Amino acid sequence: MIDWSREERYKPIEEVSKEELNELENAVKKCPFRQGYHIQPITGLLNDPNGFSFYNGEYHLFYQWFPRGPVHGLKYWYHTSSKDLVSWEDHGIGINPGDWFDSHGAFSGSGIVHDNKLHLLYTGNTRDENWIRTPYQCLAIMDDKNRVKKHSEPVINGVPEGYTDHFRDPKVFKKGDEFYAVIGAQNTDLKGRVVYYKSKDLINWDFVNEINTSLKDFGFMWECPDYIELDNKGILIFSPQGLEQEGDKYANIYQSGYIVGKPIDLSSGEFNHGEFIELDNGFDFYAPQTTEDLNGRRILVGWMGLPEIEYPTDKNGWAHCLTLPRELTLVNNKLIQNPVKELDELRENHRYIESMINGEERSFDGFDGERYELSCTFKDFSEGKVGVKLRVSENEETVVYYDVDNKKFTLDRSKSGEVFATEWGTTRSTSLDCKELSLQIFVDSSSVEIFVNGGEKVFTSRIFPDKNSTGIRFLSTEKCSIKAHMWSIK
Ligand code: FRU
């Protein structure tokens, strides 16, 4: 086992021995929790999705990568691409850190197509001999052969007055003939903020302002901002750190959510918006990023993990995966998230049942598995609890249910298999008011993604059950009728 001293964490991959990498690959291969259809690292740690874009006939999706183990160290951008958002091809390292402006990591950032090339704007993390951090915003340009070349110097140097060295994660967008980049920041009062810059050529950037939200005291740092417009509304997505839990809200170590209002006035930064809404109510979701495809669809991918938490795969030398891509739409000022249509391609071996359940748990022939999509509706209930248990065996189960009386939807992973992060609780809930319940559920070897009532709420979570925990049981403490479709996943 490596002792993760500072020196080890920041050692570049070229200096790592073949033996170490072989050993690591073998440990990863032996892991029972490798995913079947999610983007996951070949070894080491994956975190934020980066540079998500459509370029040269394909989606490109990079992610933060520390190759050598399940810890945060020298970060690379790892490059993947896909024609259909379903099967992804690995291309290896996309951005290699190590220049003076990214000596301690190529941190998160985004992509935009300009002059037929994919322009990647990212944060160069640097530390001096006293471990003082200076962040630089840097540019790397990828051509149609997937060759990435860094600009010779940073495009934004250091930090503007009034902010600390927590200043990172540029997300670029174009409005009119101007490029803008929102950047996650902490002000010198140690409050999270988003600032933005503008540019005509992606090389020369001018600071414009802070985005003036009403959330003046809302955590100590806002990471990974993203600004999009849908249906003439402006939506600022960001990942605030340091919120206290309030009832069912903000139950994870860090949060991810959005605020909606009239589009931001980009000359002043004024933003009149509604309340902060969490994007996902599950246990493992952070630092999402969106892109727009050629048809104007807005697609989001998140990191299915969180910082500072140990996961059961750590002992096998790897950690985390990305979520499935979700399409975003705006309804009544709320984001609705649904798995992209293309994911239907994964389906095989269709099964279907219709039944009544009355004060019982029921399983059905053919309804079981380790990796599958399950789409079910519950009707004609008026009290009690209705729901479904996934990955069931004698000792394990992952339970999702709607508590009709208390109008609450809950995911319970207390018996999901290997337990972890229990100091953050073993259930997640959110209020929900419905007469019928529909669930579209994607189960992979070590995750669940649950889309509730057509994407009104989403619960994304890692679970670590035994391979043989494959049962599915529908439950209703009173009377209810169910219909369920199920597909195995290739
Ligand atoms: C979010 C984050 C970003 C940073 C990156 C480093 O998870 O902390 O703010 O750029 O991870 O890997």
Image (cartoon, helix red, strand yellow):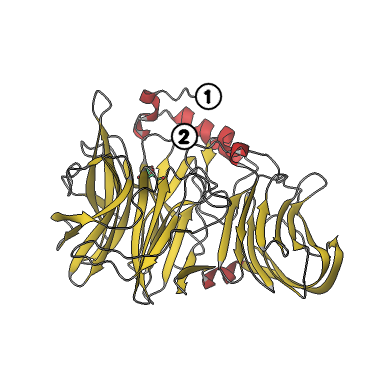
- Check disc 1 and report its element: helix, strand or loop: loop
* Residue type highlighted by circle 2: Val
Front residue of this view, candidates 358 and 84: 358
Q: Residues within 10 Å of mark 1 (few under 14, many from 20)?
A: few
In-front residue for pair 452/54: 452
Quarter of the picture containing the C terminus is bottom right
* Residue 299 image point, x, y percent: 43, 66
Judging by the rendered image, the residue that carries numbered circle 2 is 71
Horizontal and vertical percent for residue 226?
Answer: 35, 59
Residue 389, position in %: x, y?
A: 75, 56
Is 145 positioned to the left or the right of 254 in the image? left
Visible in this render: residue 490?
A: no
Disc with the residue nearer the chain's start (1 vs 2): 1
Tell me which corner region of the image, top left, top right, bottom left or bottom right, holds residue 421. top right
Q: Residue at x 83, y 73 (%)?
A: 355
Point 22% across, 65% down: residue: 266
Q: CA distance from mark 1 to mark 2?
A: 12 Å
Asked whether residue 376 appears in the rendered view, the answer is yes
Which residue is painted at 22% across and 48% down in the image?
138
What residue sits right under mark 1 in the picture? 1
Mark 1 or 2: in front is 2
Q: Which mark is residue 201?
A: none
Above or below 453: residue 102? above
Which x, y percent locates residue 183? 28, 52
Residue 227 left/right relative to 435: left
Seen from the viewer's position, the closer of residues 362 and 143 is 362
Count of marks placed on residues: 2
Query: Which quadrant would residue 205 be assigned to in this image?
Result: bottom left
Circles 1 and 2: CB distance less than 8 Å?
Answer: no
- Quadrant for ligand 1 reads top left
